[in-house]
Amino acid sequence: MFADPEELAAGVVAGERRAVARALSWVEDRVAGWDVLLARLFPHTGRARVVGITGAPGAGKSSLTDAFIARLRADGRSVAVVAVDPSSPFTGGAILGDRIRMQDHAGDRGVFIRSMSNRGHLGGLAATTPRAVSIVDAAGFDVVFVETVGVGQAEVEVASATDLVVVVVTPGWGDSVQANKAGVLEVGDVYVVNKADRPGVDAAVADLEEMLALGGAHRPVVTTSAVDGTGVEEAFSVVWDRWEAAEADGELERRRRRNLRAEVRRALHEALVARIDDHPDGDELLSAVERRLLDPWTAAERILVSRR
Amino acid sequence: MFADPEELAAGVVAGERRAVARALSWVEDRVAGWDVLLARLFPHTGRARVVGITGAPGAGKSSLTDAFIARLRADGRSVAVVAVDPSSPFTGGAILGDRIRMQDHAGDRGVFIRSMSNRGHLGGLAATTPRAVSIVDAAGFDVVFVETVGVGQAEVEVASATDLVVVVVTPGWGDSVQANKAGVLEVGDVYVVNKADRPGVDAAVADLEEMLALGGAHRPVVTTSAVDGTGVEEAFSVVWDRWEAAEADGELERRRRRNLRAEVRRALHEALVARIDDHPDGDELLSAVERRLLDPWTAAERILVSRR
């Protein structure tokens, strides 16, 4: 079953869970036909609300996501989670976490959770994430959470795959230089200080608000204790309201356009790289670069020019 | 002065500090002519020993790098540091740190330190870092340190710009799942447990060795207290020996080839993206994608095909 991309796309659009799982593996592993699959799904995308949840390891992203899932399920909304694990670039071991988490939602067909890992493909997770989102979006899930361990580059990547970004921090998450280094002050739309039962929460909120204000950004900061549910309802409302405000004022459309443009660029990149292998002089050019007889930029130019 | 890439390249090769600084700005800002500049420098590269130093914010990377610099200066070797700060993807504020650090080496022309930030260019730091390394390499610095805040993706990027990677961790750096999530177990050639004056150092070393052994990797783990210099000499020797072993057994050559191939791919990507703007139907295709009339993968294919 699902032997070809057309059939697989039909299964995804029909919301079949096995088709969704298979499609995700296709984009993750770049199985031949993944691009046709996505092309077929594309007209069915753009309906889900796509929210990124990022933060340092241990900040409590999964607990918060799970609390949001419970809240959405109570409203009858279906939810998919794409948990992006940039941990294992070479071996590609997606961690146990999602299996454990799926058990909590076992039997609930309104919830779908999938971890993606970087299997060493060029472009890696930066490319896989928005494609995975397209699949669950096309499958009809109302809300998609993209959960990612974020420091630096990862935040930018989650922003380019989502409608808005929730940054989760904990009290004692570090001084302002480190916060700045972690890049969290630049991509968040909503900030959640989680583990609010711990000491230092007021100071953490004050620090964060001050840093955001210094940067000219006025973003909501809320506190939660996701494990016992404190503050989750308010956090959820803030995120939800923020999404609706973005829809109303055109920001959502602007971001989605930006993200689609980024996808065209990635697609071009991959299509091109795939063709280096087919290029009659590809090996020879690469080998000349390795021996430093030719510089990489001139080599690239020759490959491009010869394709005209 | 340094008005054109040829002149600037000549200044870099002559080791002029102002030329080096200017050249780094060119690649960072993608000033027109950066590719010609790098092409001219390319035959002069491949001489420096290039070592990545990565780890979480606060692990003590800068202190360790500074201790290594002092050690190398005592031997009469010149050193350049490319400090990669993935923090500020959108505003591009490279932080105060390097200015402060440069003051420590003020007047020592054998040391050059430069922070690079991601100024929002496509490819960002992943592309800028190896190019910055090429510049200081061509300028004749004996050793280049690439210092980067690492979690996840960043480690892979530092590996693709360097000969070997030193991962710096601290006692209490987290349990094994987090270590795994941070990706540190996959790219390090040498592990340094820094801040060894703190409690938990033996446990941290034991944990790390066990995790590395589980993963089948046998990598040296050393402890330092970089601020007061404890263990720095041994750490330095381990790194230096490791580099020489890699040179002797062909691993160095293999890695440098891999890195050059990656650079050809990046150069192709950028050259191609630059041409989307010139493409007669570029705007129209992008606009069709934004309106979901055309999928990104088909759009990419059309741009490619029409260039033949």
Image: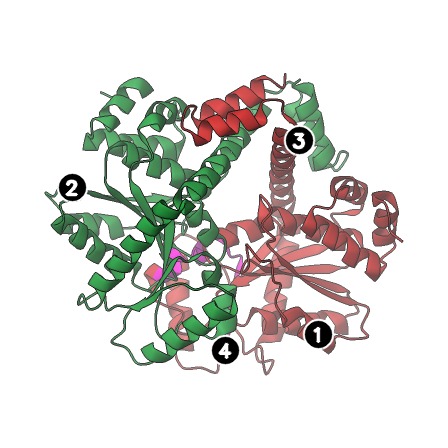
Chain colours: A red, B green
Report the side of A108 relative to B192 (left or right). right
Location of residue B136 with respect to B89 vertically, above or below = above
Q: Are marks 2 and 3 on the same chain?
A: yes
Residue linked to disc 2:
B110
Label 4 and label 3: CA atoms lie apart by 43 Å
Q: Which residue is mark 1?
A: A70
Labels 2 and 1 within one chain: no
Rendered-image quadrant of the C terminus of chain B: top right
Residue at 33% from the left image edge and 32% from the top image edge: B45
Closer to the eye: label 2 or 4: 2
Tell me the amino acid under the disc marked 2: Gly
Residue indicated by mark 4: A195
Kind of element beneath mark 1:
helix
Q: CA distance from mark 2 to mark 4?
A: 48 Å
Q: Is residue A189 magenta?
A: yes
What's the distance in space between the residues labelled 1 and 4, CA to CA? 18 Å
Q: Which residues are magenta?
A: A178-195
Tell me which label, 2 or 3, sits earlier in the chain.
Answer: 2
Crowding near the residue tagged with mark 1, few <14, some 14–19, many ≥20 C-alpha atoms within 10 Å? some
**Rendered image: mark on residue B286:** 3
Residue at 52% across, 25% down: A285
